Image (spheres, rainbow, N blue to C red):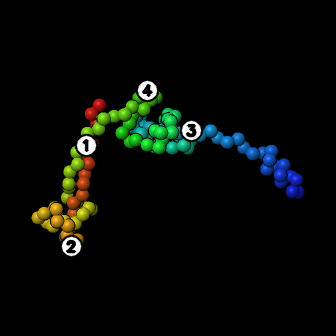
């Protein structure tokens, strides 16, 4: 290949840029699956840049539009295998040698 052929190919065969599309892929119930700019299989709607950047998980897709859902959350300390090691008789005292582990569990309820 000559230098001229290289430049002809480079300058004349540049593919057109793909327009930017912000997408929200969602499940059958309208809950968000993934915010992306990729072309993937599945149900999706085009969204604006701000919605894409925020990527709010507390929305639903209803009639092809994003609808914010109200959510009530309750936080509770629960004993488990993972979390912070605490004194067996007092969760407020951190004890690295203790086998008693506590972590925060969040229970969310949709109010719409």
Residue pointed to by mark 3: 21
Residue pointed to by mark 1: 73
Taking the image as shown, residue 31 lies to the left or right of residue 80, namely right
Mark 3 or mark 1: name the one nearer the start of the chain: 3
In the orientation shown, which residue stands out farthest toward the top?
A: 63
Task: Find residue 25 and report its horizontal and vertical position in percent.
Answer: 47, 39
Mark 2 or mark 3: name the one nearer the start of the chain: 3
Task: Find residue 55 and report its horizontal and vertical position in percent.
Answer: 43, 43
How far apart marks 4 and 3 lie (CA) works out to: 19 Å
Task: Find residue 83 and report its horizontal and vertical position in percent.
Answer: 26, 61
Mark 2 or mark 1: name the one nearer the start of the chain: 1
What element does badge 4 sit on?
Answer: loop
Residue pointed to by mark 4: 63
What element does badge 3 sit on?
Answer: loop
In the picture, the disc for residue 28 is none
What element does badge 1 sit on?
Answer: strand
CB-based contact (under 8 Å), mark 2 and mark 1: no
Task: Find residue 102 and report its horizontal and vertical position in percent.
Answer: 21, 60
How far apart marks 4 and 2 lie (CA) works out to: 54 Å
Residue pointed to by mark 2: 97
Q: Residue at x 47, y 43 (%)?
A: 53
Mark 4 or mark 3: name the one nearer the start of the chain: 3
Give the quadrant of residue 56. Answer: top left
Q: Residue at x 72, y 43 (%)?
A: 15
How far apart marks 2 and 3 lie (CA) works out to: 52 Å
Please say if 62 is above or below 51: above
Mark 4 or mark 2: name the one nearer the start of the chain: 4
């Amino acid at each position: 290949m000559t230098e001229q052929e290289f430049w002809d190919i480079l300058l004349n065969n540049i593919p057109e840029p793909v327009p930017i599309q912000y997408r929200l892929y969602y499940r059958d119930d309208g809950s968000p699956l993934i915010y992306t700019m990729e072309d993937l299989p599945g149900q999706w709607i085009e969204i604006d840049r701000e919605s894409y950047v925020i990527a709010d998980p507390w929305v639903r897709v209803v009639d092809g539009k994003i609808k914010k859902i109200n959510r009530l959350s309750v936080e509770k300390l629960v004993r488990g295998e993972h979390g912070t090691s605490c004194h067996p008789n007092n969760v407020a005292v951190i004890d690295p040698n203790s086998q008693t582990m506590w972590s925060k569990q969040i229970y969310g309820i949709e109010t719409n």
